[in-house]
Amino acid sequence: MQMQFEKNSIRCLRSVLCETKDHEETYELRLEDGMADIGEIIGCWGQVVVRGKEWRPGGISTNGGIIAWVLYKPEEGEQLCCASAWIPYQFKCDFDENERDGGIVVQPLLSSLDARMISSRKIMLCGDISVLCQAMVDSEITCFSPGAIADDIMLLQETFEPLLPKEMNEKAFMLDDAVTFPTSAEKIDKVVYYQLSPSVTDYKVMGDKIIFRGQSRLHVLYMDTDGQVHTWDEEFPFSQFAELGREYTDGSCANIIMAVTSAALEREENGYRLRAGLTGQFVIYDHEKITVVKDAYSPNRSVSVHTEDLVIPAVLDVQQRFVSGDCRIGDEYVDVVDSVLYPVHPRAYKDGESTTIAHSGVFRALCRSLDGELGFQSVQFNTEESVASDMTAKPMVTVSSATVPQGMTSGSAFVLSSELESKSLWIANKPINMVTELDVGDHTESLDERPGVVLRRAAGDTLWEIAKEYGSTVALIMDANQLQGEPDVDRMLLIPIL
């Protein structure tokens, strides 16, 4: 006789794409009429902006641009000049799925930007972007429960509470704040470049809402009316909430990735104002209680089990780490006027029994030589760390923030250092073997008297295995031996036999 188990569906998200893509864009910048001819390029900087994301059959696409700034010396005169450009980008990521819709998270990081003089009126810009792309679709996991089962059939059940991805969404908002330059900066002539770096400091999932707070650090390089360059840093806090599609438990968590969607530092009558668009992209994870049958038997008749693997996309661990990076500035410079760090998305690879996470980035420094001339240094740093991990898990590592580089002298050299904050989600498709149906034989005649055996519990034997082998039940063995749980190894046990 066949006993079919009941099917139950568990809704969660399934990842169809999670990878980092490198993208390169080039752009020819032509100076506007009235701007001085180029004599020498000093340095260049950029800000990545995300404009749109689109789901398409077999992949996703994203577009945006790099706001690029170039500082140069003119052919004639001593006053430094600035030029800017918008470098558009668009790229696609393909996957082997034909889902019509899903959720998308992208995090583009500017990994390098170079400026090369073509002529006195033209500059060739080349920008490299490192983009984390994540795409997920709604899915259902099927598990089986026994339903109505005969009293003589013993079931070995196990309960799991994996952390599953449940919802992907985003919250877009605007910053509109006055920039409070110090009083000593009243003679600002022009802004050379600015960089906006948003980061989330804390969040909470509360029922059907998520609340997150953070700050956007604005870093500005500007020039005064005397032609001298200065830097200014200011933080703009934000606090946002978003409605969720369902109620979540107290044990739920989120992974929030920020993106800049627009950025403008505008001059007004009384100073400067920052107007920027930000988007908090998030995935909500929650625990799901899943009970499956691992084995079955009957003391009175034969039972054959049919099993399947229940594959669960579970988060096994969440790690937040701080990694330091540093670089050495050339000996020809005596001072660093301005410095920023362009981090690259970390790469992870298996290394024996552990996982190695490789961090890298580029320090970009505007320096001053002994004779007072400005020069530009672009120095890469690389560092690795070994992390103990489940070998079946694959980490998704994101850069949360990077501090403003700090400079210090080391002997005759100048050293820049910065601290990166990264977050790792260790995700694995864990198979759980479960019983889906039973083939049950006819009842056999039971003995009038119930004999028993005495045995010594061997290491590794469980009460379930002993009961199944000798035709008893766990409850009878525990009652006969006055047990509260699994007995100690080598304990003598009385095994009642049905």
Image (cartoon, helix red, strand yellow):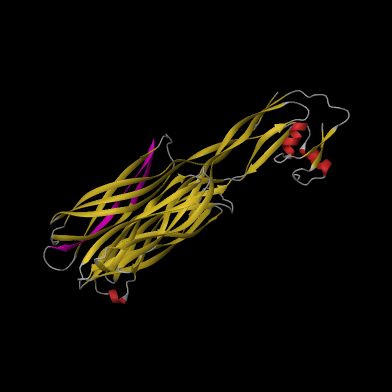
Residue at 45% over, 49% down:
356
The residue range painted magenta reads 50-74
Q: Quadrant of the C terminus?
A: top right
Judge left or right: residue 202 versus residue 31: right
Give the x, y percent position of residue 215: 42, 63
Q: Nearer the viewer, residue 479 or 379?
A: 379
Q: Residue 444, located in which quarter of the rendered image?
A: top right
The secondary structure making up most of the magenta span is: strand
Q: Is residue 270 magenta?
A: no
Q: Residue 6, located in which quarter of the rendered image?
A: top right
Give the x, y percent position of residue 329: 29, 63
Give the x, y percent position of residue 317: 53, 50
Residue 206 seen from this side: yes
Residue at 27% over, 54% down:
113
Residue at 49% over, 51% down:
387
Residue reaching furthest to the left = 76
Residue reaching furthest to the right = 449
Q: Nearer the viewer, residue 374 or 246?
A: 374
Judge left or right: residue 263 versus residue 77: right
